[in-house]
Amino acid sequence: MIDNDRWGIIYCPKQGIRRSTRRWEQLQEALDAAGIAYDFVQSESPESVGRLTTMLCRAGYRTLIVCGGDGALNRAVCAVMEQPADEVAQTAIGVIPGGRGNDFATFWGFSEKDDRQTVAWLRQRRLRRIDVGYISCTDGSGTTYFINCVNIGLVANILKLKYRSRRIAVLATLTYIGNMLQLMFQRPQTRVRLHVNEETIEQKAMNICVGNASGYGQTPSAVPYNGMLDVSIVSHPKVTGLIIGLWKLLTRRFLGHKNVRAYRTPRPIAVADIHSAGVATDGRVRPDIHAPFEIGILPEHLNFIIPA
């Protein structure tokens, strides 16, 4: 039987980054200096994170630490949520930010630049019950989960470009930036139909973000402990409006843009149609999710380790 104080660490090196060994050595130094008892497994691909998390859960680990970004954390959360309810209630998840996107970790004040501080906070095991968002496909294909946000449309398409170019260094990065800018300034729209609170919304939209947390700045007022989902719907702006929108996004005033409609709801959101728009959960592209589906919230459903 695994000691309840022993951590199970899932180390998820950044794809295409050759310094992953050095990164683990630095983390190991911080863990050993703090006197942490742990076992670690390294993912060989993003897809393996869920399998490794399930393995650690079944082995009896009740403190799971994900060293990686939002996508890795999402896969780990989904794997934990698939365990029996009594085991989910006894399990705590923590994060050491180390991915290309660390929005949920940043929300709580964790930084990739200070592993020793992160380890010190995690060691104190201060738990917060956080809300978990879910997407339930009405075709019976299953339920998946998120803790940061769901994106439908432009952001999901940008993430697709990101993953295509992640394995090659400088040239691919420049190509990704160029393609991203071209996509943004094309401002593609999709006709969507969804039901939020008592309102049925049917319009053309560039992006929809449903946030349980900050949603990469698109739902800046959302917090993962109030039993609510925040929704921002971005319609087609002019080029000048796009530039203003990017500025407002960076300065956390995104909801003040005239092309953004904002909602907050404790009720499930029925998404009836998104046509060909892409879907992403917590920065993870999800080609397996198709409308119609329901987006909802499970209040205070998961133990998360937060800074002391």
Image (spheres, rainbow, N blue to C red):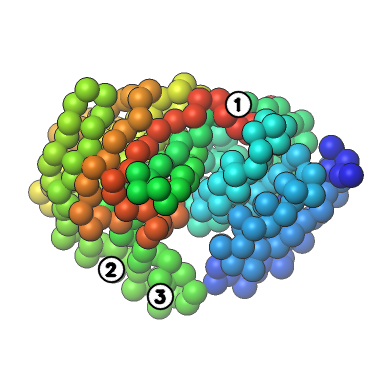
Q: CA distance from mark 2 to mark 3?
A: 10 Å
Left or right, residue 249 beside residue 225: left
**Which-is-in-front pick, marks 1 and 2?**
1
Question: 29 or 276, which is in the foreground?
Answer: 276
Residue for badge 2: 179
Marks counted in the figure total 3
Residue 172 disc label: 3
Dot placed on the residue nearer the N-terminal end, 1 or 2: 1
Residue 10 occupies which quadrant of the picture?
Answer: bottom right
Residue 93 occupies which quadrant of the picture?
Answer: top right
Residue 170 occupies which quadrant of the picture?
Answer: bottom left
Q: CA distance from mark 1 to mark 3?
A: 40 Å
Q: Position of residue 152 (x, y in %)?
A: 30, 49
Q: Secondary structure at mark 1?
A: strand
Q: Position of residue 161 (x, y in %)?
A: 35, 66
Residue for badge 1: 129
Q: Which three-letter amino acid code belongs to the residue tagged 2?
A: Asn
Q: Secondary structure at mark 3?
A: helix
Q: Are marks 1 and 2 in contact (CB under 8 Å)?
A: no
How many residues crowd around disc 3 within 10 Å: few (fewer than 14), some, or many (20 or more)? some
